[in-house]
Amino acid sequence: MEYVDLYLVHWPVAAKPGEPQFPIKREDIMPLDLSGVWRAMEECHRLGLARMIGVSNFTTKNLQELLAIAEIPPAVNQVEMDPSWQQKKLIKFCKDNGIHVTAYSPLGGQSKSNAVIQSEVLEDISKATGKSVAQISLRWIYEQGASMVVKSLKRERLKENMEIFDWELSDEDRLKISQIPQHKRVRLTGIVSPEGASNVDLAELDIVEM
Ligand SMILES: NC(=O)c1ccc[n+]([C@@H]2O[C@H](COP(=O)([O-])OP(=O)(O)OC[C@H]3O[C@@H](n4cnc5c(N)ncnc54)[C@H](OP(=O)(O)O)[C@@H]3O)[C@@H](O)[C@H]2O)c1
């Protein structure tokens, strides 16, 4: 490959140089040199190695810091987003600043206990519309102006997940989805703590959760 279409900073977190080990040990976490990282990303773009550059898992605070120093603003912020974690404030901030949002784990990820696939609200809408729960979630994301990276190992589901563009949710369905209780699934403590979430004080490490 001579270039990539889009190159992302995966997390606003830095670890000591070397082979990445997850979860990152507390003593291996370093202050993030956002300016240095972004200069290097911009250089990738200028050299033609990345057509677009962006970020992932950035909060509005992270984005504000980045926009203050960027010569080339991030094209994309890829974040956890689905009907059970709607990210309204972040979506608005990104829209106001011309940053496209991509939803990752748009079906709630791969765990058995899943707030999207097992949502009663989405199940009711599914029964009434004849669309699958997955399609309701993906369509809702699309209607927020975001794109999505959805994953399946099954051919029929890959097809099903693409069939969301020739119909729309009703206002009533949108209202019901807007009232779904919110629950964040992906936590930074999952990647920075070998001892488990309760043993890491993110504020002490100068890390802000979304
Ligand atoms: N930037 C980041 O930090 C970050 C973090 C997490 C994930 N991601 C990215 O997000 C993408 C997707 O993430 P993900 O796999 O965690 O979550 P996901 O796409 O929300 O969920 C995938 C799960 O949903 C199932 N599924 C797919 N289509 C379905 C359908 N139509 N009906 C019912 N179940 C369906 C899949 O099972 P089957 O395979 O059996 O269909 C799989 O178990 C990946 O590319 C991943 O790399 C990025």
Image: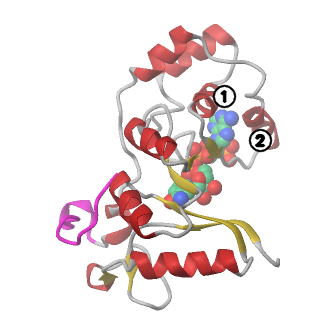
Circle 2 residues within 10 Å: few <14, some 14–19, many ≥20:
few
Residue 85 visible: no
Hey, what amino acid is under mark 2?
Leu
x, y percent for residue 202: 23, 65
Circle 1 residues within 10 Å: few <14, some 14–19, many ≥20:
many
Picture layout, residue 2 above or below residue 129 = below
Q: Identify the element where label 1 is drawn.
A: helix
Does the Cβ of the disc 1 residue fall within 8 Å of ligand 1?
Answer: yes
| Majority secondary structure of magenta residues | loop
Residue 206 on the magenta segment: yes
Q: Residue at x 59, y 40 (%)?
A: 146
Residue stretch rendered in magenta on the structure: 195-210
Q: Earlier in the sequence, mark 1 or mark 2?
A: 1
The residue indicated by pointer 2 is: 158
Q: CA distance from mark 1 to mark 2?
A: 11 Å
Pick the residue in front: 100 or 25.
100
Q: Residue at x 56, y 67 (%)?
A: 72
On screen, residue 156 versus residue 189, left or right, reads right
The residue indicated by pointer 1 is: 135
Hey, what amino acid is under mark 1?
Gln
x, y percent for residue 95: 51, 41
Q: Residue at x 63, y 44 (%)?
A: 148
x, y percent for residue 179: 38, 20
Q: Residue furthest bottom?
A: 18
